[in-house]
Image (tube, grey):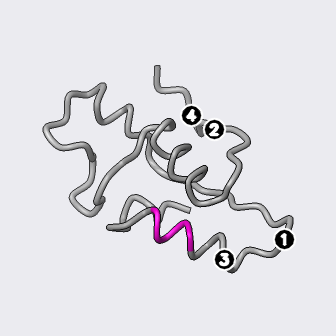
Amino acid sequence: MDVIEHVINPIKYLEEIYKILKTGGVLLLGTPNGMIANKNKCIIKTHSKFHVMENTPNELSSFLQSTGFRPVGFYANKNIA
């Protein structure tokens, strides 16, 4: 949880996870929502100086699909609307 936003190459990171995950295994991935950074008009696409990038759900879904994962759903841990 909360690691992918610190990774320079998220595709390679997900490829490695996919390789070692048991058949039928499930990846639970937690990360800040990049849409919030954009909504708040941040100059860079991140809230934290320690984050390489905060991805939108669409970007994350694209990364997951390109590495063999089948995204099931996206859930927020709190309503910030």
CA separation, marks 3 and 2?
Answer: 22 Å
| Cβ atoms at labels 1 and 4 below 8 Å apart | no
Percent coordinates x, y for residue 50 in the rendering: 26, 63
According to the image, label 2 marks what residue? 74
- Mark closer to the observer (3, 4): 3
Q: Which label is found at residue 19?
A: 3
Question: Which marked residue is nearer to the observer: mark 4 or mark 2?
Answer: 2
The amino acid at mark 4 is Lys
Residue in the picture at 40% in, 45% down: 55
**Residue 15 x %, y %:** 56, 70
Q: Residue furthest right?
A: 24
Dot 3 or dot 4: first in sequence order is 3
C-alpha span from label 4 to label 2: 12 Å
Of the residues tagged 1 and 4, which is closer to the observer?
Answer: 1
Q: Quadrant of residue 49?
A: bottom left
What amino acid type should be assigned to the residue bearing mark 3? Lys
> In what element is the residue under mark 1?
loop
Q: Is residue 32 above or below residue 69?
A: above
